[in-house]
Amino acid sequence: MIIHLKDGLTQEEIQNAADATQAIILNGNGVRLITPAKMKEPPTAIEPWVDSFHPTASDIQLASRGYSSDTRAVTIGDVTIGGTTGNSVVVTGPCSVESREQIFNVAEFVTKLGLKTIRAGCFKPRTSPYSFQGMGIKGLRLLAEVREQFKLCVFTEVRDATHVDAVIEYTDVIQIGAKSMYDHGILKACAKTTKPVLLKRGFGSTLQEFVQCAEFILSGGNPNVILCERGIRAFEPKTRFTLDLCGVSYLKEHVNLPIILDPSHAMGHAYGVGDLSRSCMAMGVDGLIIETHPNPKMAKSDAAQQLNFDQFEQLLGTLTPVASAVGKQVV
Ligand code: PEP
Ligand code: MN
């Protein structure tokens, strides 16, 4: 249950109300108490301090459409998604920053296409310790140069909580990778800022678990969370993962956070990324994140799934009519 407290209460009254309801105190939009979901109404002792209360069906609370029906607007640099914008942001770039030349090459390409965002990882959560782990802080500094020179808004991932401050300083969106979805150190660090967070779904996680991880960030004070479906593990090994489009419908119906889809990591092969991207766009999502590399065969991570520039440009041309058919515009 979410309780909106009356204005003008003392800190002591707020704390007493929180203690009486085992609640988290959330400042912003007045003072709110987030109690365990099973609580159906405020205890009589705190009634004089209550302005309104909103029972919720599960611990999907701040993110639920039952509490707030409109999709949240999240602003990424000078692009806003969600709210009433109708924007669908197409974010592209390599899996990893590999060199100055590579990332500047991609930034020029993205700018030429009129896009406003770029993606690239510097702290890569690899499945093998012997694979390329990312350029780390040197890569982040290159991304900061790209941001400055091309005025692009940069998405990049953190691999642990110690990366969060640097990612905030050098870039625009903190990406929490699928393997880190449950990392409470990262979730808590992301709750302390208002920097937008792209939270990727763990590939073995239910929708409830996924959105509850978003609730850790929201209830800690950061309202700017975007969900990312990037494929879950099913029994089929021919594709890398299985993009859960049924899950996307569930999220659109029940959850008020913007949704970005990642067809690249779901498919794992460049040949399927175009068809999947158009299918995702047809679902009226708030954005796509697609891996593109100047020379995919030579990529240091995720070589098989990255598009080359020609493939991406061609794909982008086909996304625009699909977006407009569902009332969206590509930004
Ligand atoms: C990535 O975006 O490059 C990545 C590693 O994604 P995920 O966390 O979804 O595997
Ligand atoms: Mn990748």
Image (cartoon, grey):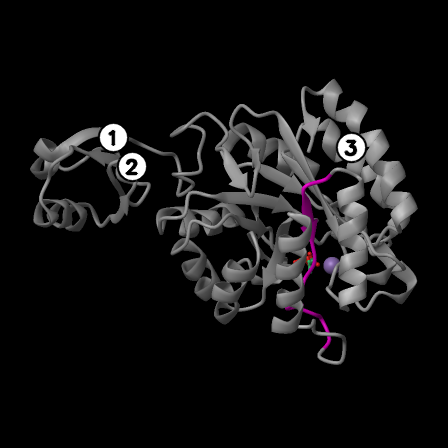
In magenta, the rendered stretch is: 115-128
Q: Which residue is mark 1?
A: 53
Q: Secondary structure at mark 3?
A: helix
Sequence-first tag of 3 and 1: 1
Asked if disc 2 and disc 1 are in contact, CB closer than 8 Å, the reply is: yes
The three-letter amino acid code for the residue at tag 2 is Ile
Ligand 2 found in image quarter: bottom right
- Residue shown at the point (67%, 45%) measured from the top left: 117
Q: Secondary structure at mark 2?
A: strand
Is 10 part of what is drawn in magenta? no
Q: Circle 1 — which element?
A: strand
> x%, y% of residue 63?
44, 38
Choose between 137 and 275: the one closer to the eye.
137
Position above or below: 60 against 130: above
Residue marked by disc 3? 279
**Residue 240 in view here:** no
The magenta stretch spans residue 121:
yes
Q: Nearer the viewer, residue 133 or 210?
A: 133
| Image quadrant occupied by the C terminus | top right
Distance from Cα at disc 2 to Cα at disc 3:
36 Å
Please tell me how crowded label 2 is: few (under 14), some (14-19), or many (20+) other residues with Cα within 10 Å.
Answer: many
Q: Is residue 315 left or right of residue 54?
A: right
Question: In terms of sequence position, does the residue under pointer 2 or pointer 1 come before the other?
Answer: 2
Q: Residue 182: x and y, percent?
A: 51, 60
The residue where tag 2 is placed is 2
Whether the residue carrying mark 2 lies under 8 Å from ligand 1 is answered with: no
Count of numbered tags? 3
Real-space Cα separation, disc 3 to disc 1, in angstroms: 39 Å
Please identify the quarter of the rendering in which residue 53 is found.
Answer: top left
